[in-house]
Amino acid sequence: MPSSPEKSDFIRQFEFVGTIDNAPYLCVPAALQFRRDVCGGEERIMEYCTRLAHDAGELVADALQTEVLDNSTKTLTRCCFANVRLPLAVGADRTKGQIPHEDVARATMYMTRVLADAYNTFIAVFFHAGNWWVRLSAQVYLELKDFEWCAGVLKEVCGKVRRREYLDGGEAGRAKL
């Protein structure tokens, strides 16, 4: 498709979409009806997900012997997410399993990749204020037992990071079990 020279590179790259599929829009009424009739409506869904996120955060933090990120007014946890600190430390003492500061990005990418490749899941991993955290997302299709599984997986992945498996190249570094 020819493009005019006054358009930005972004516009030129994405202006032609080939085909447009409007089918996803057709399912919206059925999805809203499902949320209302099966799940009990938006208010009930929000109550369930908020409670699940709170309980999941506490469960995972207890299992990892860490904490849930919150503020003094406890408003950071009044939502469908919980941020839980991972039991990993940044430092130079490798005998204590500390991760050198220069390896933070590499270890973070490794955890994200291993969670997807070896455990078939996605858990957002991020580094904030000198610690690694994971963001747990409560959804209507999840139960507390899903987060029990998550806690076990996070323990395993943290063990891999302490053993410096993120330094392994090739297949071992990608998804070594």
Image (cartoon, rainbow, N blue to C red):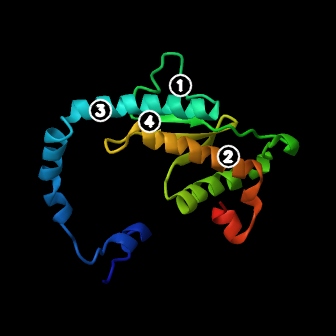
Q: Is residue 129 left or right of residue 52?
A: right
Q: Earlier in the sequence, mark 1 or mark 2?
A: 1
101 or 142: nearer the viewer: 142
SS at mark 2? Answer: helix
Q: Circle 3 sits on which residue? A: 46
Disc 3 residue type (three-letter):
Met
Q: Circle 1: is it few (<14), some (14-19), or many (20+) Cα within 10 Å?
A: some
- How packed is label 3: few (under 14 Cα within 10 Å), some, or many (20 or more)? some
Which sits earlier in the primary sequence, circle 1 or circle 4? 1
Mark whose residue sits in front, 3 or 1: 3
Q: Amino acid at mark 2?
A: Cys
Task: Report which residue position mark 2 lands on.
Answer: 158
Judge depth for marks 4 and 2 and give the one in front: 2
> Percent position (x, y) of residue 67?
60, 28
For residue 164, which quarter of the picture?
bottom right
Q: Secondary structure at mark 1?
A: loop
Which residue bears the numbered disc 4?
A: 81
Name which residue lies at 36% across and 70% down. Answer: 14
Whether residues under marks 1 and 4 lie with C-beta atoms below 8 angstroms apart, the answer is: no
Across and down, in percent, residue 36 comes to 15, 39
Q: What percent of the width, then of the height, locates residue 85? A: 61, 35
Measured Cα–Cα span from mark 1 to mark 2: 22 Å
Q: Which residue is at a point 32% across and 83% down the rendered structure image?
A: 2
Precedes in sequence: disc 4 or disc 3: 3
Dividing the image into 4 quarters, which one contains the N terminus? bottom left
CA distance for labels 3 and 2? 31 Å
Depth check: give the residue in front, 73 or 54.
54
Q: Residue furthest bottom?
A: 1
